[in-house]
Image (cartoon, rainbow, N blue to C red):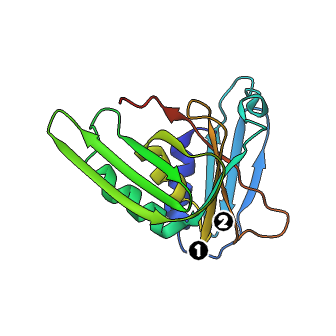
Amino acid sequence: MPKKPLNLLKSILAGSEEDVTIEYNDSNAKFTFENTEMVCRLIDGKYPNYEAVIPKENPNKLSIDRNQFLNSVRRVSIFSNKTTHQIRLKIAGSELNISAEDVDYSNKAEERLTCDYQGDDMQIGFNSRFLTEMLNNLTSDDVSLEMSLPNRAGILTPVDGLDEGERVTMLVMPVMLNN
């Protein structure tokens, strides 16, 4: 589906408890709720094999309070490079160090958080905008970030707060760290 109709639905239905009826065929989707009917064209094309890019072996697992992590990423990202939005996560033991630096303006920020971490000490970079958006769209108290290597994708999942049978998997791609 295109992004625009979904954003419209999200804003119209914010805080609503109304049921939504969804009907679709190969080319269109129709959403019916209250006295409103919304029709949008579906994107034509073959859906990519997303299962192929989800890493299977992730021995390094970080568990942390979602709100603390989100707020820290937001604060630190203010000082990140305005083009790359790069932040660095340095994980060692039960300590997560989140930092960002914009060498063009000599800005730097660093925060430390306590976390639960099993795995090898690691430094990995992410685009703070993507990480913020992912954390914003979760409602769980705690999140888990599973990683294998600093140049491989990480998997962000909620630890709690899901309905029965619901699964959420978010793939966050790393950025190359400039040392």
User: Is residue 50 rendered to the left or right of residue 10?
Assistant: right
Q: Is residue 163 left or right of residue 13?
A: right
Q: Secondary structure at mark 2?
A: strand
Quarter of the image with the C terminus is top left
The residue mark sitting in front, 2 or 1, is 1
Q: Residues within 10 Å of mark 1 (few under 14, many from 20)?
A: few
Percent of width and height locating residue 105: 14, 38
| Residue 151 x, y percent position in the rendering | 57, 29
Q: How far across and down, in percent of the image, does residue 17 sit?
A: 64, 76
Left of 145 or right of it: where is 71?
left
Residue nearest the viewer, comparing 96 with 92: 92
Residue 168 sits in quarter: bottom right
Residue at point 56%, 46% (across, down): 121
- Nearest to the observer: residue 4 or residue 138: 138
Residue at figure coordinates x 40%, y 56% from the top left: 73
N-terminal label among 2 and 1: 1
Q: Quadrant of residue 88?
A: top left
Q: Which residue is mark 1?
A: 16
- The residue beneath circle 2 is 33
Type of amino acid at the residue the image marks with label 2: Phe
Find the distance from the CA under tag 2 to the CA under tag 1.
10 Å
Q: How many numbered circles does the render carry?
A: 2
**Labels 2 and 1 touching (C-beta < 8 A):** yes
Which residue lies at the image location 50% right of the left edge and 40% below the top edge? Answer: 124
Image quadrant for the N terminus?
A: top right
Q: Secondary structure at mark 1?
A: loop
